[in-house]
């Protein structure tokens, strides 16, 4: 008889207690809660492009607007990047932009008057452009799945940059609005199989933890179109994690989705 068997026979209550303590330890299937942190944009350091990365997925990872990140790195549309490329996360210095636009010498009173007049002349044009931009982004959203909300949006305490919706494995995931797929893959840790859709110049939406992805990058999709199937990739249970970003910043999807 081994010493283990003797210990079980002599101290059964102690062995049982040890077993219970061990079984209560953390599970390797526990979801990673800090993958949605931090909520603030990352504006320091850099990112080395990995295979599968897109500028949109990099901007998503660091809570940045993709257009602003492209401008800071001198990348023009359609925003092609390459493995090994270094993407700076530091915004372009405002001081450099200000000094470049400032006059070389102190203007005379006449030139100051002309300068002020030109500013006033462009103001109505700027307001008109801003109004047209707001009209362009006005859109109708719809629920991506039929399941109830099981975890709400929160940027304080237990951070969640979107909402989590219950569902069964294999149930359809639908695009919440018309748009174009700008990311389709599993390169963002904690999101599992992820789809990101660009809807217009300001809004993006994301659909995470899918078991299957049914769309490709560059593909146009319609509101209500099936784009994936519910799964548990990157998490511990079948569900959909859904996010909406406005100008690169997470917003509460409940403020955009229709009331049920």
Image: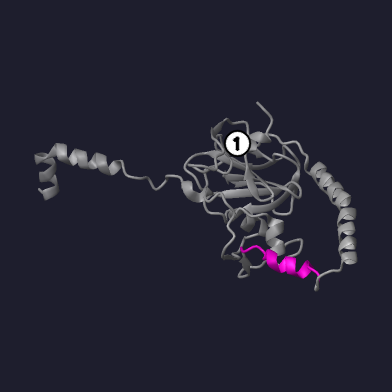
Q: Is residue 41 left or right of residue 216?
A: left
- All told, the count of numbered labels is 1
Q: Residue furthest top?
A: 260
Q: Residue at x 59, y 60 (%)?
A: 43
Q: Is residue 73 visible?
A: no
Q: Is residue 116 visible?
A: yes
How was this image coloured? one colour
Q: Nearer the viewer, residue 48 or 132?
A: 132
Q: Nearer the viewer, residue 140 or 42?
A: 42
Can residue 66 be found in the magenta stretch? no
The picture places residue 123, in percent across and down from the top left corner, at 86, 51
Q: Nearer the viewer, residue 201 or 235?
A: 201
Q: Nearer the viewer, residue 91 or 34?
A: 91
Q: Is residue 127 depicted above or below 223 in this figure?
A: below
Q: What is the magenta range?
A: 89-103
The residue labelled by disc 1 is: 171
Q: Is residue 18 left or right of residue 153?
A: left
Q: Is residue 255 depicted above or below 116 in this figure?
A: above
The picture places residue 23, in percent across and down from the top left corner, at 29, 42
């Amino acid at each position: 008889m081994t010493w283990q068997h003797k210990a079980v026979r002599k101290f059964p209550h102690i062995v049982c207690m040890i077993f219970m303590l061990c079984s209560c330890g953390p599970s390797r299937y526990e979801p990673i809660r800090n993958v949605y942190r931090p909520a603030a944009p990352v504006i320091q350091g850099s990112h080395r492009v990995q295979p599968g990365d897109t500028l949109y997925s990099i901007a998503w990872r660091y809570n940045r607007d993709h257009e602003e990140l492209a401008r800071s790195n001198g990348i023009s549309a359609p925003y092609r990047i390459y493995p090994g490329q270094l993407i700076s996360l530091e915004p372009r210095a405002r001081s450099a932009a200000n000094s470049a636009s400032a006059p070389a010498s102190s203007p005379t009173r006449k030139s100051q008057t002309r300068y002020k007049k030109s500013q006033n002349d462009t103001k109505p044009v700027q307001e008109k452009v801003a109004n047209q931009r707001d009209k362009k982004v006005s859109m109708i959203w719809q629920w991506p799945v039929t399941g109830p909300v099981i975890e709400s949006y929160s940027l304080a305490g237990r951070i969640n940059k979107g909402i989590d919706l219950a569902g069964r494995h294999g149930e359809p995931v639908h695009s919440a609005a018309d748009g174009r797929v700008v990311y389709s893959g599993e390169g963002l840790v904690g999101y599992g199989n992820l789809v990101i859709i660009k809807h217009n110049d300001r809004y993006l939406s994301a659909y995470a933890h899918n078991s299957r992805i049914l769309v490709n990058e560059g593909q146009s999709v319609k509101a209500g179109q099936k784009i994936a199937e519910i799964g548990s990739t990157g998490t511990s249970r079948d569900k959909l994690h859904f996010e909406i970003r406005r100008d690169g910043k997470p917003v509460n999807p409940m403020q955009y989705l229709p009331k049920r």
